[in-house]
Image (cartoon, rainbow, N blue to C red):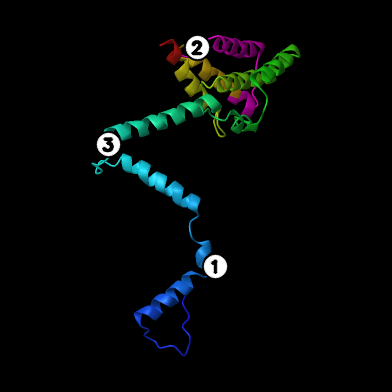
């Protein structure tokens, strides 16, 4: 806000008003808000580049437009060569699995399932092997498992990728839920069935790849 001296007239002439305005804009607070030369250069480039694609701009030569598009393509290709194709960050959801924070790999879970089966703990063997199955498909980026994904939801998604195993996947998910949440006791046959399902999926390709 411009503060006028008490002794000056309320309605200055044009020259006086201009001088006051320049003096006010010269204060550090206004200078700090000014865009830097880099800001101006970037903005000028963006204005020029976006103007090339303005259909109302009839003055843009087709050759210049083609060069601009080619430049963008080259930049994208170089970025892919240097940094690779963007992929989903596996570590971001690797700990979330059916309501638990479990950061083990599928191989670790399979070993735990085998150890449980060797002790005759069939319920734990079922739980660990189903987790291994889910983590394996997630590691292969075939079926994403996010925080909050249930066993049944995972089975439906996996069944879409492996239609031939849809019924077995749903049965395994129901077994997992029963053992995990209803304290049902799994049998040796249950553990062998889930392990066989995991082995089949590990050796199979999804329907989209086979098509």
Q: Earlier in the sequence, mark 1 or mark 3?
A: 1
Assess disc 3: are there few (<14), some (14-19) or many (≥20) residues with their C-alpha within 10 Å of its C-alpha: few
* Residue 188, quarter of the rendered image: top right
Residue 128: in sight, yes or no? yes
Residue matched to label 3: 61
Q: Nearer the viewer, residue 208 or 175?
A: 208
Estimate how packed mark 1 is, as few (under 14), some (14 to 19) or many (20 or more) residues with alpha carbons within 10 Å.
few
Q: Looking at the image, which residue is at 27% across and 39% down?
A: 60
Mark 1 lies on residue: 28
Q: Quadrant of the C terminus?
A: top left
**Is-magenta flag for residue 113?**
no
Q: Earlier in the sequence, mark 2 or mark 3?
A: 3
Residue 114 coordinates in the image, percent (x, y): 71, 13
Give me the residue at 43% from left, 74% from top. Answer: 21
- In what element is the residue under mark 1? helix
State how far apart marks 1 and 3 are (Cα). Answer: 44 Å
């Amino acid at each position: 806000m411009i503060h006028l001296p008490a002794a000056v007239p309320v309605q200055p002439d044009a020259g006086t008003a201009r001088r006051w305005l320049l003096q006010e804009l010269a204060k550090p607070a206004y200078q700090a808000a000014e865009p830097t030369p880099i800001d101006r250069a970037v903005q000028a480039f963006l204005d020029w580049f976006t103007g090339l694609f303005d259909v109302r701009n009839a003055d843009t030569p087709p050759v210049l437009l083609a060069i601009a598009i080619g430049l963008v393509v080259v930049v994208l290709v170089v970025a892919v060569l240097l940094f690779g194709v963007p992929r989903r960050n596996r570590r971001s959801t690797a700990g979330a699995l059916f309501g638990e924070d479990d950061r083990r790999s599928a191989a670790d879970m399979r070993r735990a399932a085998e150890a449980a089966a060797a002790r005759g703990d069939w319920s734990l063997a079922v739980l660990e092997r189903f987790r291994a199955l889910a983590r394996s498909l997630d590691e292969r980026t075939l079926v994403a498992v996010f925080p909050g994904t249930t066993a049944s939801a995972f089975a439906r998604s996996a069944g879409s990728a492996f239609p031939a195993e849809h019924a077995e996947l749903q049965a395994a998910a129901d077994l997992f839920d029963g053992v995990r949440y209803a304290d049902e006791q799994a049998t040796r046959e249950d553990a062998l069935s889930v392990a066989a399902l995991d082995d089949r999926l590990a050796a199979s390709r999804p329907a989209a790849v086979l098509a």
